[in-house]
Amino acid sequence: MIHSLFLINSSGDIFLEKHWKSVVSRSVCDYFFEAQERATEAENVPPVIPTPHHYLLSVYRHKIFFVAVIQTEVPPLFVIEFLHRVVDTFQDYFGVCSEPVIKDNVVVVYEVLEEMLDNGFPLATESNILKELIKPPTILRTVVNRSTNVGDQLPTGQLSVVPWRRTGVKYTNNEAYFDVIEEIDAIIDKSGSTITAEIQGVIDACVKLTGMPDLTLSFMNPRLLDDVSFHPCVRFKRWESERILSFIPPDGNFRLLSYHVSAQNLVAIPVYVKHNISFRDSSSLGRFEITVGPKQTMGKTIEGVIVTSQMPKGVLNMSLTPSQGTHTFDPVTKMLSWDVGKINPQKLPSLKGTMSLQAGASKPDENPTINLHFKIQQLAISGLKVNRLDMYGEKYKPFKGIKYMTKAGKFQVRT
Amino acid sequence: MSAAPAYGEDKGGSAGPGEPEYGHDPASGGIFSSDYKRHDDLKEMLDTNKDSLKLEAMKRIVAMIARGKNASDLFPAVVKNVACKNIEVKKLVYVYLVRYAEEQQDLALLSISTFQRGLKDPNQLIRASALRVLSSIRVPIIVPIMMLAIKEAASDMSPYVRKTAAHAIPKLYSLDSDQKDQLIEVIEKLLADKTTLVAGSVVMAFEEVCPERIDLIHKNYRKLCNLLIDVEEWGQVVIISMLTRYARTQFLSPTQNESLLEENPEKAFYGSEEDEAKGPGSEEATTAALPARKPYVMDPDHRLLLRNTKPLLQSRSAAVVMAVAQLYFHLAPKAEVGVIAKALVRLLRSHSEVQYVVLQNVATMSIKRRGMFEPYLKSFYIRSTDPTQIKILKLEVLTNLANETNIPTVLREFQTYIRSMDKDFVAATIQAIGRCATNIGRVRDTCLNGLVQLLSNRDELVVAESVVVIKKLLQMQPAQHGEIIKHLAKLTDNIQVPMARASILWLIGEYCEHVPKIAPDVLRKMAKSFTAEEDIVKLQVINLAAKLYLTNSKQTKLLTQYVLSLAKYDQNYDIRDRARFTRQLIVPSEQGGALSRHAKKLFLAPKPAPVLESSFKDRDHFQLGSLSHLLNAKATGYQELPDWPEEAPDPSVRNVEVPEWTKCSNREKRKEKEKPFYSDSEGESGPTESADSDPESESASDSKSSSESGSGESSSESDSEDQEEEKGKSSESEQSEEESGKRKMKKRKKVAEGQGEGSSSDEGSDSSSSSSESERTSDTEEEQVEPDSWRKKTPPSSKSAPVAKEISLLDLEDFTPPSVQPVSPPTIVSTSLATDLEGLTLTDSPLVPSLLSPVSGVGRQELLHRVAGEGLAVDYTFSRQPFSGDPHMVSVHIHFSNSSETPIKGLHVGTPKLPPGISIQEFPEIESLAPGESATAVMGINFCDSTQVANFQLCTQTRQFYVSIQPPVGELMAPVFMSENEFKKEQDLQAGH
């Protein structure tokens, strides 16, 4: 299965290597660098690169390439999924996953990687078990420098029937929080009509409960959830029969489920964008005007609005005035970004001005697409509502909280 | 440069309080010249007695290893610490050992005894870790020791140690492949393991060591299927892909007889896999009798696999979803493959690497099964922020999905893509338009017009790509497109991209008879600029000249000679060569007349139109989801996906003897406890409820079999005939006439339709089954209102019982008893009671109460399986009728059937061992039961209002079987007759107002 792992930063340095079988020389990465050069952009590096004796499978996250070396046939998604799991684990351990952090914690990283794979086959990938095996660094332990990373008691969680939960959990405040977060992916065409819209929802949980609690979560309208994927803790049968989520939660943060609502008529689009972007053939000036307004918001305010747009290469500079918020234009990358903030329905935010184009060059024949980011608190746009949360198996009364939020996912307006 | 920050931790460590003498100059970290000195430091630290110093040293060494620095010269100093008491030091030493042992084999041997001691440790985790490190040290000398350790660990008490043993197998195999035979023995042993922890790892070992030994899987096949949902994700992937291969060798192709499968109601029903997941119940399939050459009948084991993998489409792991998807693609009947589309589309939201792989597979699938993804067309629309490689794959899928109906939307979408800033992507889009135009004749002209418009695009790359595509399109029907060729001819003045110019010239030359006036003129212009052209264009100019000379020599003779003369002195030898060759061909000369006579045939031969097809065509001969498929080349170690066998191999090889079958109820419960998680869906609701749910699910399956055979096919047809007749009779009064019998019929029909939908629709069954479920619930409600009118309708379904028996083989329910039919005449009360009770229970199996026959509706429990009973199969049902002998007793119908070769004589109950309070009224002895025959007897049991188990013996003349009946709470009731008003009154009292 997975032979080796190389971590490569954006400037092409291999800053960590780990081998689970015989050592593979790091020169194998030359093939990767070649492909990287050909791809020009990091995200266009093919995830699978065949070389004469090995195959390189890579993922790119947090500006780091995680390159796995394999030698024999293995489902590529198996490796890719694992690499992403590695990144998630690092993030879980260190808060962020970046080159300096990995270098600072290189021993912990190495120990974690050692536990995650045995002879290239995944062994312990649940973060709850890993944390039992190898303790994440804490401020206290770095200060005192009694730095044993290895847990002193034996990691019995590995043996239990609920392998995702560590044993002997104790809290003084027992609390369970659930965040229902929905992202709208949409493509809006020139005239403002929706070409495609989907809702991608997740329920992220932060559960800090003593002992072995058994939770059930029920929804007011479970029928909305027709395409769901679960954390392994969820009892699938129970969901099939009663549409109730029943599970013994992992300890700490985890993603309970993610779902997908694709029926187009169900998706309410909470914002609209009016735009007028025009280039003229003769002059070297173009007009630029955007207005953002609320559409179907169910009475909630739209916050955190950010408008970004990749301008055509011919645009040299832009002189714009926003009615609110701040904007920047990077003349090198041609990226326009406008941080709008809250939308006040009485006074719609707008951004107006002119673009200066390359003199003499013909007008660009493509119009930029506008990417939109926004947040709406206290609303799940699909209408999903949690009915109740019950706990069995433990005596105490936990504190329970549920939060809803709608965000823009890949929300694009074509102009 | 990267070295300095990496030392942050080391510096912090060594500068810590207590050991300033080892304080380390920060600069030396990055300088190689100081390597020697530093290593001396480390050696010294490792030799001290202080654990903290050792730890510090080990940490630095591991950091070196992580950065790829060579630390091998420290080996002797490190290996000494292998027995260190400090756990972390020990762990880091292990890390070091595993990395360098291969290079320093002799020294590595020093550590072996420590691990051997560890293998005997009372703690399972220490045993496991010792085995893990021991097997990771790649030193050939210790192969025998490893072999011994693996063998021992394979029969360890702890499943975790056994899992580690499974992991060790491929390690040893890669070290010494001569051990294969012994290792296969271990694998065989571990394959029989019943824990989920081991299953994934051992199958992985199987795949690496002996993937060809498919025979090892037979006995474990059903177990693996049933365990699958509880195995961890990585194991699931490996098991699923192995089972895909297995199924390809053992079952028949489900596509060979598609039409019959349309009727298969299995799909609506997949909720009932419960009984499968429960374990032993399924292990005993009644498959042996399946005729192989008959119209295709899916092997129940094949079905089992499909059914048990389906829930995994909802896994959070993309790898698992992909594995199930490929399993369905390769193994499922056409009608069922559709379910995977939704899950795959969901994966498109994931990381771009996942998208990349999934889209590759979708592209392949969408060529074979276009209909599957058509509903999700819009999910493949491209965003400007997608990476180019994703865009191009999505484009591929969109092109594959385009058909007569959706082509307008697809083309509109393409139109926006053409204006993208990403030029590679624009070029790919133009190619895609070309492919749509060739595939869908209706839009060919539209596409062509669109492409011609693109010719006036400002971007030359776009124009060039368009020209190339237009050229291909025109080749298909050149006659109609004189105009376009003229238009293209004009472009030669402006367009500079060589490939495009060449394409235009080729077109004009090829179809010069359609543009007789323009062609010579173009040649004239090209002759003028000949010397400045690119090589590829020059070659085409020569071609054009030659063709024109042959068709229109009067006008172009001189021009051609001029061009050929120019070419004769060209710098490029290809061009000189071509010129010489062409001249010889076309210009008649004295000696070479033979060839020039055929020159026209040579140059103007009709050329086949190029076929524009997907690069993903025929990629599906690689197993989907595999690396080989992605690369479209066989990767090392790829296991070919075998073709379906012509004739099914013996299915009985998968039968597993279950010795203690009679105690199944106990066993089941025990199993449920130790069994992990998903299967005990009713876990919390207590044992009574789960016991209660069993008969329910079974009843559902019973009713299903009858619905399929009895009413589903024959009687629903006759129903509809009836209906039509009636329509003829009373077509006008039909609506007003609310005759109840007729309403019934309609309802029945609706149910049948609902099922038909469920099975034939290739949409995700989630949605369709939920809708049909709701339909059914509404039916149930109505049913309860008029149960007696329904009663009249039941006879047909029981009449068709013999048919039901035969066809019930189709429905693959292992539980369906061979032939027993209820004997007792059902009463109205019992039916309505049965339906009422249905409402009480909480099972997930979609109920079809309208098709229940009163007795089977209560659900059959198995008392004695036919294998355990040596041919005697016994089921029991709670008939929910008063027991005539004693009002305190519950009446239990016992159904016997003899599937053995010899008659069974003297069936009676012998010496019951009963808990206090429980009593049994035995059934009269059955004298003899001939082979193939079945009989029913009624016995009464007084359970004393408890759910205690009644154990008794079932005796024949020769044998005694110990059996037990445990009543679910719901069955411990006495039937009471009351009128509706009375009932309502009682109900009010219960409600407590």
Image: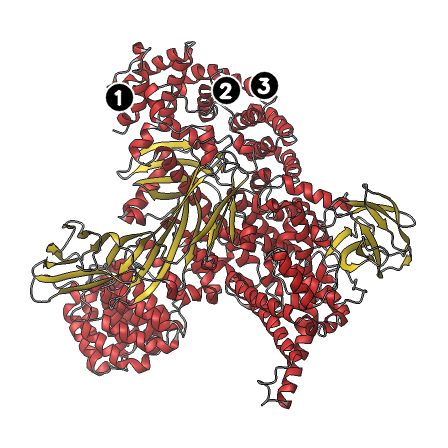
Question: What residue sits 22% from the left and 52% below the top?
Answer: A342
Question: Where's residue A397, x and y in %?
Answer: 48, 38
Q: CB of mark 3 within 8 Å of CB of mark 2?
A: no
Q: Amino acid at mark 1?
A: Ile
Q: Residue under mark 2: which chain is it in?
A: B
The numbered dot on residue B31 is: 1
Q: Residues within 10 Å of mark 3 (few under 14, many from 20)?
A: few
- Residue ID for mark 3: B117
Would you identify the image quadrant in which residue A194 lies? bottom left
Residue at x-position 75% and y-position 48%:
B945
Q: Which mark is residue B925?
A: none
What's the CA distance linking mark 3 and mark 1?
A: 41 Å
How many other residues sit within 10 Å of disc 2, few (<14), some (14-19) or many (≥20)? many
Query: What amino acid is labelled 3 in the image?
Result: Arg
Which quadrant, please, contains the C terminus of chain A?
bottom left
Location of mark 2 (residue): B108
- On the picture, is B504 further left or further right than B191? left
Q: Earlier in the sequence, mark 2 or mark 1?
A: 1
Q: Position of residue A170 (x, y in %)?
A: 47, 30
Q: Viewed as shown, does residue B270 lie left or right of A26?
A: right
Q: Earlier in the sequence, mark 3 or mark 2?
A: 2
Q: For the residue labelled by badge 3, is the local secondary structure a helix, a strand or a loop?
A: helix
Residues at marks 2 and 1, common chain? yes
Along the viewing direction, whichever of B448 and B708 lies nearer the viewer: B708
Chain holding disc 1: B
Q: Residue at x 51, y 31 (%)?
A: A167
Q: Nearer the viewer, residue B747 or B264?
A: B747
Q: Which chain is disc 3 placed on?
A: B
Of residues A310 and B716, which is closer to you in this image?
A: B716
Alpha carbon separation for disc pair 2 and 1: 29 Å
Amino acid on which disc 2 is placed: Ala
- C-alpha distance separating marks 3 and 2: 16 Å
